[in-house]
Amino acid sequence: MKNRINQLLEEVNQLVAANPDELESLRIKYLSKKGEVSALFNDFRNVANEEKREIGQLLNELKNAAQDKINELKETFNGSTDTEQKTDLTRSADPIKLGTRHPLSLVKHEIIEIFSRIGFTIAEGPEIEDDWHVFGALNFAPEHPARDMQDTFFIEQNPDVLLRTHTSSVQSHIMVQQKPPIRKLFPGRVYRNEAISYRAHCFFHQVEGLYIDKDVSFADLKQALMYFAKEMFGADTQIRLRPSYFPFTEPSAEMDISCNLCGGKGCPFCKHTGWVEILGCGMVDPNVLENCGIDSKIYSGYAFGMGVERITNLKYQVKDLRMFSENNVRFLEQFQSAY
Ligand code: PHE
């Protein structure tokens, strides 16, 4: 028995394990209930009384040695697997998901950027307005249908507190506040009481431009808009101006660009006309200048206004306006940009 104990003691002291699985089988082999050490403890019953003391001590020594060795090996494993995890420089990092700009913000920034290169700076006005700034100052006749409940959101039934229906209202503020020359851009949200569908919404965004100085002519307007169209949609883009009507401009026009999908040849997108409408514009009506305290005999000016959703549609072919306000991440994350 003594020999067997000494033999095991030697074995145990030289144990090595390559991995935690091997270590576990060693533990089972020596220390489990059916293991070698337990077997010796079972045999202990048969040891002669006078030897019990010595053999008992030896057995305990063996048991402790086996336990210590297994623990020692376990520790080296724990240690090494831990550090491996902490210092695995080859592991790829978790990707950090970057957000994207909303397509309307992208296009708004691009419009602003293009006009800023020809001297336009930004001004903003309130979304909750009075009748004078949205309609009165801008030459809308008292019974003009745009004032109607069907178009305009009034706040608390008060006909003088309303949500602006166009960013032209900022013109009224700026012309009252500043002396010409004025060369400003007004980006902002506007509201109209429309049933929501793929082509209409109760709120949308506009960017308005206003230039007032001595001797501003229609040719200046046309040149600025042509520059914008080519910068926004490409150097080959053609423009055409069709006579139109707005109460606050005279003469007024709507501007089309050659269809940027088919290059003007005609396709379903431009309804086979080769042209798509992008904005309204005109020379500021002298009545408007006078309403805002600017001498129309000395100064003249032009104004233009465009829908940001419309321009975004043309640039990215978003067919359904509602996509812009539904916050569908799969839609939104397609728009990557440096802005
Ligand atoms: N305010 C007009 C609209 O909302 C657009 C426009 C602006 C037209 C400036 C002419 C000049 O439709």
Image: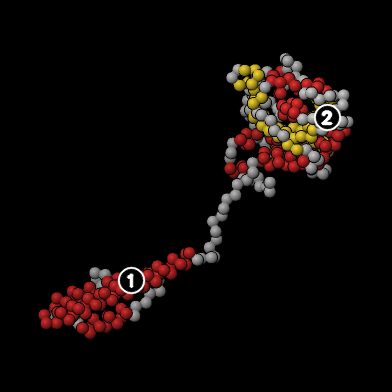
- The percent coordinates of residue 94 (x first, y second) are 54, 56
Q: How many labels does the image show?
A: 2
Q: Does residue 288 show up?
A: no
Q: Nearer the viewer, residue 291 or 235?
A: 291
| 336 relative to 78 in the view: left or right | right
The structure residue drawn at horizontal position 20% and vertical position 78%, both measured from the top left corner, is: 57
| 304 relative to 297 in the view: left or right | left
Give above or below for 38 relative to 336.
below
Residue lying at the far left in this picture: please name it. 49
Answer with the quarter of the image where residue 180 lies. Answer: top right
What kind of residue is marked 2?
Gly
Q: Which of 233 and 98 is in front in this view?
A: 98
Q: Quadrant of the N terminus?
A: bottom left
| 133 relative to 254 in the view: left or right | left
Residue lying at the far top in this picture: please name it. 143
Q: Name the residue under label 1.
A: 71
Rendered image: mark on residue 301: 2
10 Å neighbourhood of mark 2: few (<14), some, or many (≥20)? Answer: many
- The percent coordinates of residue 261 (x first, y second) are 76, 41
N-terminal label among 1 and 2: 1
Give above or below for 297 relative to 269.
above
Give above or below for 1 relative to 254.
below
10 Å neighbourhood of mark 1: few (<14), some, or many (≥20)? Answer: some
- The percent coordinates of residue 287 (x first, y second) are 81, 21
| 78 relative to 91 in the view: left or right | left
What kind of residue is marked 1?
Asn
- For disc 1, does the CB lie below 8 Å from ligand 1? no
Numbered disc 2: secondary structure: strand
